[in-house]
């Protein structure tokens, strides 16, 4: 959302292919967190929790997010409609605010 000028952020979420995820699992120590596969590399925490989101529809699968990504300045970013769907599932107050910000941005 930062790259689009929608709002500032304190973190960065990345989506990687299943092949890269499998490679990271092999190369780094595994930490289990509430049935979620996570990896910590220096101060970067990798989490597999989104794999379970396939039950909410194909848009939640990493390969779909990658293949439908928007390219901005040569870098791919998850499509805003998919971000809205993900945030609607989380439905935390910050996510609901983000949905409103995205919708406002999309009306421009």
Image: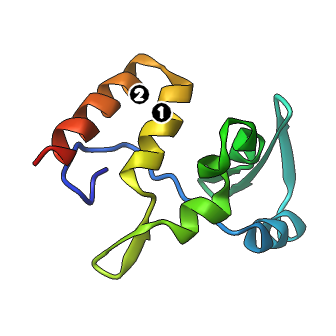
Q: Residue at x 47, y 19 (%)?
A: 92
The total number of labels drawn is 2
- Colour scheme used in the picture? rainbow
Residue at which label 1 appears: 87
Give the CA distance from mark 1 to mark 2. 5 Å
Give neighbour class at mark 1: few <14, some 14-19, many 20+ (Cα, 10 Å): some
Of the image marks 1 and 2, the number of the one nearer the N terminus:
1
On screen, residue 37 above or below 3? above
Which residue sits furthest left? 108
Give neighbour class at mark 2: few <14, some 14-19, many 20+ (Cα, 10 Å): some
| Disc assigned to residue 95 | 2
Q: Nearer the viewer, residue 46 or 57?
A: 57
Q: Considering the numbered disc 2 on the image, is that residue within a helix, a strand or a loop?
A: helix
Is 42 left, or right, of 18 in this rendering? left
Asked whether the viewer can see residue 20, the reply is yes
Asked whether the viewer can see residue 15, the reply is no
Q: Residue at x 77, y 67 (%)?
A: 18
Q: Nearer the viewer, residue 30 or 85?
A: 85
For residue 27, what is the image quadrant?
Answer: bottom right
On screen, residue 21 above or below 84? below
For residue 75, what is the image quadrant?
Answer: bottom left
Residue 13 coordinates in the image, percent (x, y): 51, 52
Is 64 left, or right, of 94 in this rendering? right
Q: Residue at x 47, y 33 (%)?
A: 87
Is 102 left, or right, of 96 in this rendering? left
Residue 77 coordinates in the image, percent (x, y): 42, 64
Q: Nearer the viewer, residue 40 or 73?
A: 73
On screen, residue 14 above or below 49? below
**Would you say the residues marked 1 and 2 are in contact, meaning their CB atoms lie under 8 Å apart?**
yes
Is 33 left, or right, of 88 in this rendering? right
Q: Residue at x 27, y 40 (%)?
A: 102
């Amino acid at each position: 959302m930062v790259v689009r000028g929608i709002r500032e952020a304190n973190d960065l979420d990345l989506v990687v292919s299943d092949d890269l995820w499998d490679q990271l699992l092999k190369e780094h120590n595994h930490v289990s967190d509430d049935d979620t596969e996570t990896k910590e590399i220096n101060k970067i925490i990798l989490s597999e929790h989104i794999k379970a989101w396939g039950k909410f529809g194909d848009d939640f699968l990493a390969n779909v997010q990658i293949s439908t990504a928007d390219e901005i300045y040569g870098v791919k970013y998850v499509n805003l409609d998919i971000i809205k769907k993900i945030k609607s599932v989380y439905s935390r107050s910050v996510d609901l605010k983000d949905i409103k910000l995205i919708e406002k941005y999309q009306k421009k």
